[in-house]
């Protein structure tokens, strides 16, 4: 590990703007994974020629943007809870859940409500109503694992169920476990995740079944907690070229996971348990490398727009498939099937509409709940005046 510098943040405040940039990058990867073609496309082949397969594999690798979200969430929550325990002597579990409810539930349930409305549209499906019920009780991950992915624009919300299941034990382990026990807990999560991957490999499970499995995704949370424990509240102080190398290492891990170990596959081409274990390990490792690459970066080097988009990244994630639906059905329709330039123009329109929806939502819908959340905060993780002024 490179040399570490003590964080200049006080025990009562831990805000790192670079983590907002990481949030934005995580969403961008997810967005690209849902936008770029992952299977052979004649229009793309006509433009890229023999390089087209690289694009398809890269699009599949972008799925690990979700792994990055999970690792970042675990890192930050563990860091804040440890600081809370060191500041006041314990962890306020009830306060933790109140903060999470005020941050997640209002926007999450709005997304579920919008998904329910979309189920009644002409191209909606009655089965979507049942699936919205699974999402409403935070069982969306198991619903997606058992019954397959949801075609409804609220489909990506299954991952919030995984996050909520992590919250069931997160405050308790930090409250009652010392650092040595937390290391052991991380090892247990890795063991459970890899055992599940091996089992799903022997079962020849589908790609969507594996990806939506909460036990599989728990290793991302373990990776985030482990990074928090190793850093011990300090920030990496490393040269720029090393940070760039770590970013290259992130993409190499993700690309090799999909290309070499086939952790993302079509139809019934399950590569087997050992390949899945290696592929998902590379996914988690790549997420940690990216976090280390950004932690401790001089805030002056970070673009304000990226920090702001990171702050509204939850809204970007919730709304992006709704924006895609509207773009496909209202703005482009059948034109999206004509030529590859239209595909890129459509993707830009989808991204712009997503940002617009998330910005309006953050300002006019989420902000009151965030103000309430602030009242239950022990270790401040917002920039000074974040809810009073939009400086970014």
Image (cartoon, rainbow, N blue to C red):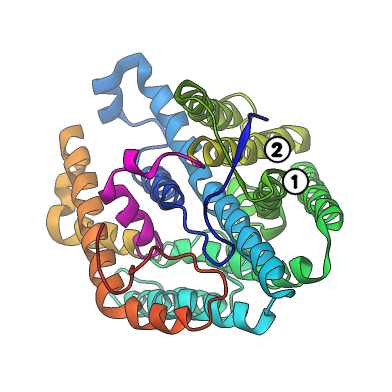
What residue sits 77% from the left and 38% below the top? 273
Using residue 22 as the reference point, say whether residue 258 is left or right of it.
right
Using residue 390 as the reference point, say whether residue 136 is left or right of it.
right
Picture coordinates of residue 246, whole percent (x, y): 53, 28
Vertical placement of residue 26 versus 371, above or below: above
> Which comes before the other along the chain, label 2 or label 1?
1
Is residue 339 in view? no
Label 2 sits on a secondary structure element that is helix
Residue that mark 2 sits on = 276
Is 78 a magenta residue?
no
Label 1 sits on a secondary structure element that is helix
What residue sits 49% from the left and 64% below the top? 381
Principal SS element in the magenta part? helix
Please give the range of residues in magenta. Answer: 295-318
Is residue 80 in view? yes
Residue that mark 1 sits on = 197
**Could you say which is closer to the camera, residue 345 or residue 146?**
345
Picture coordinates of residue 184, whole percent (x, y): 86, 52
Is 316 a magenta residue?
yes
Kindly indicate whether the residue at mark 1 contacts the one at mark 2 (C-beta within 8 angstroms): yes
Picture coordinates of residue 355, whole percent (x, y): 25, 58
């Amino acid at each position: 590990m490179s040399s570490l510098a003590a964080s200049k943040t006080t025990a009562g405040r831990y805000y790192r703007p670079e983590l907002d940039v990481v949030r934005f990058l995580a969403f961008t990867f997810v967005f690209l994974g849902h936008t770029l073609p992952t299977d052979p496309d004649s229009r793309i082949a006509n433009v890229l020629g023999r390089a087209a397969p690289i694009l398809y594999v890269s699009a599949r690798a972008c799925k690990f943007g979700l792994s990055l979200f999970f690792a970042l969430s675990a890192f930050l929550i563990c860091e804040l809870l440890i600081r809370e325990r060191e500041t006041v002597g314990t962890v306020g579990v009830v306060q933790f859940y109140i903060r999470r409810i005020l941050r997640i539930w209002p926007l999450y349930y709005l997304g579920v409500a919008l998904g329910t409305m979309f189920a009644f549209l002409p191209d909606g499906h009655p089965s979507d109503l049942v699936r919205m019920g699974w999402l409403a009780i935070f069982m969306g991950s198991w619903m997606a694992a058992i019954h397959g992915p949801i075609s409804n624009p609220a489909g990506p919300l299954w991952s919030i169920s995984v996050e909520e299941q992590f919250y069931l034990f997160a405050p308790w382990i930090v409250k009652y476990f010392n650092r040595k026990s937390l290391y052991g807990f991380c090892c247990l999560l890795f063991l459970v995740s890899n055992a599940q991957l091996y089992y799903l490999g022997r079962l020849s499970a589908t790609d969507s079944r594996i990806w939506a499995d909460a036990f599989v995704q728990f290793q991302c949370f373990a990776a985030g907690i482990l990074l928090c424990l190793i850093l011990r509240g300090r920030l990496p102080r490393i040269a720029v070229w090393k940070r760039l190398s770590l970013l290259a290492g992130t993409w190499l891990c993700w690309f090799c996971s999909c290309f070499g170990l086939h952790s993302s596959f079509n139809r019934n081409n399950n590569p087997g348990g050992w390949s899945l274990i290696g592929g998902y390990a590379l996914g988690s490792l790549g997420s940690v490398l990216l976090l280390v690459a950004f932690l401790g970066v001089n805030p002056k080097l970070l673009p304000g727009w990226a920090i702001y988009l990171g702050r509204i990244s939850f809204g970007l994630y919730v709304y992006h498939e709704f924006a895609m639906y509207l773009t496909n059905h209202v703005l482009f329709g059948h034109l999206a099937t004509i030529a590859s330039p239209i595909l890129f123009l459509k993707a830009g329109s989808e991204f712009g509409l997503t940002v617009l929806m998330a910005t309006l939502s953050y300002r006019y819908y989420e902000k009151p709940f965030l103000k309430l959340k602030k009242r239950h905060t022990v270790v401040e993780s917002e920039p000074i005046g974040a809810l009073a002024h939009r400086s970014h």
